[in-house]
Image (tube, helix red, strand yellow):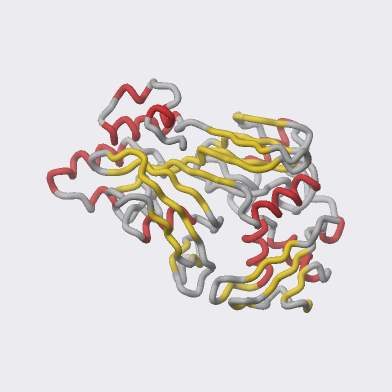
């Protein structure tokens, strides 16, 4: 068995234990609840109920085993084109397109990434009933790099490294306005009290940290390099909106970005909004240690084709529409 994961709660308080573990360790909630029920989770050296809410300073010890030993339910195969960046016997890295939900959920039972992988014949780790192989997720309308585990050993090790902040995830985005140099946003995130489909910065949430650095400055927005120190739901979008620089094209947290510019720039801002078909957010770099060999692995995915017109409009440079290695050209890579 893998060495148990031990970590301490830093947020003032959390939601119930099973939800907290599901978010922190990239598990399904059913899987997290079973771990708790089977005694694989200790809070301050004692067993705890799944409904328990945690407090700052609580010490957690989690044995990442396959709870219940049950086989995951079958994922229906549905064809969808996939951009596979790397694959071996243990893991798969792909460049997820925008518009594709990662795992089955209400409203998306058969049109997800997992359905497409089933059609491809890809065997994923059996851990998790509805989310086999899922190590981390991307929002439906966020594109970019993801790693998935093909074996239970790979899943356990990648989940452990993710929990210990050993997996590097870097995003490229267009954000309204101009950042005053590199910043770190540290603000707790929780479900919005009036809209359960949204997240919000709330003192009662779980602490989240996002590093943001401007790479290129355009008239109305910046191309920014964003690094995650934590991985909360909608974290980048919520944090950038919180500091007054929402992601261009974000229909949920955009805060009417194009309406916040001066009157003389209004038409230019509307043109940018119309050129942006979805949130201008892309997971462009992914780094981690191979879960079996220990080899350092790093992958990059260039700015996506469906957001090229937005970038060309923002920069007033139509040559970006057909240029290869756009992010490298703009000095994005460190």
Q: Going by the image, does 21 lie left or right of 300?
A: right
Residue 177, placed above or below residue 306: below
Name the image quarter holding residue 200: bottom left
Q: Viewer-proximal residue, 296 or 252?
A: 296
Residue in the picture at 48% in, 43% down? 171
Name the image quarter holding residue 3: bottom right
Residue in the picture at 44% in, 41% down? 172
Q: Going by the image, does 245 lie left or right of 6?
A: left
Image location of residue 224, percent across then percent down: 39, 44
Q: Going by the image, does 139 lie left or right of 249?
A: right
Image location of residue 51, percent across then percent down: 68, 76
Residue in the picture at 74% in, 48% down? 155
Q: Viewer-proximal residue, 316 or 289?
A: 289
Task: Tell how many labels.
Answer: 0
Name the image quarter holding residue 274: top left
Residue in the picture at 70% in, 31% down? 87
Q: Viewer-proximal residue, 5 or 135?
A: 5
Image location of residue 322, percent across then percent down: 39, 20
Q: Going by the image, does 196 lie left or right of 45?
A: left
- As drawn, the residue found furthest toward the left would be 264
Residue 211, placed above or below residue 307: below
Image location of residue 227, percent across then percent down: 49, 49
Position of the N terminus, as image quadrant, is bottom right
């Amino acid at each position: 068995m893998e060495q148990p994961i031990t970590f301490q709660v830093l947020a003032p308080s959390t939601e119930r234990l099973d939800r907290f573990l599901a978010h922190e360790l990239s598990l399904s909630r059913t899987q997290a609840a079973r771990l708790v029920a089977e005694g694989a989770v200790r809070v301050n050296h004692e067993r705890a109920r799944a409904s328990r809410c945690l407090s700052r300073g609580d010490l957690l010890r989690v044995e990442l085993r396959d709870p219940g030993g049950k086989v995951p339910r079958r994922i229906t195969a549905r064809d969808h084109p996939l951009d596979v960046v790397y694959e071996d016997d243990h893991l798969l890295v792909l460049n997820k397109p925008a518009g594709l939900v990662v795992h089955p959920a209400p409203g998306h039972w058969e049109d997800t990434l997992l359905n497409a992988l089933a059609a491809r014949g890809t065997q994923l780790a059996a851990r998790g009933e509805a989310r086999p192989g899922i190590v981390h997720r991307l929002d439906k309308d966020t594109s970019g790099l993801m790693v998935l585990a093909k074996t239970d050993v790979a899943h356990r090790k990648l989940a452990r490294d993710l929990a210990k902040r050993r997996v590097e995830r870097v995003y490229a985005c267009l954000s309204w306005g101009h950042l005053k140099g590199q910043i770190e946003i540290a603000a707790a995130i929780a479900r919005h009290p009036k809209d359960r489909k949204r997240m919000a910065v709330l003192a009662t949430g779980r602490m989240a940290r996002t590093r943001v650095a401007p790479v290129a400055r355009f008239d109305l927005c910046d191309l920014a390099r964003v690094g995650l120190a934590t991985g909360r739901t909608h974290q980048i979008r919520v944090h950038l909106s919180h500091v007054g620089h929402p992601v261009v094209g974000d229909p949920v947290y955009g805060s009417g970005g194009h309406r916040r510019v001066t009157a003389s720039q209004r038409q230019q801002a509307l043109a940018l909004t119309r050129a942006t078909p979805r949130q201008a957010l892309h997971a462009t770099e992914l780094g981690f240690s191979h879960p079996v060999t220990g080899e350092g692995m790093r992958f990059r995915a260039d700015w996506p084709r469906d957001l090229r017109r937005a970038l060309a409009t923002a920069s007033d440079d139509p040559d970006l529409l057909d240029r290869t290695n756009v992010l490298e050209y703009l000095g994005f890579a460190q």
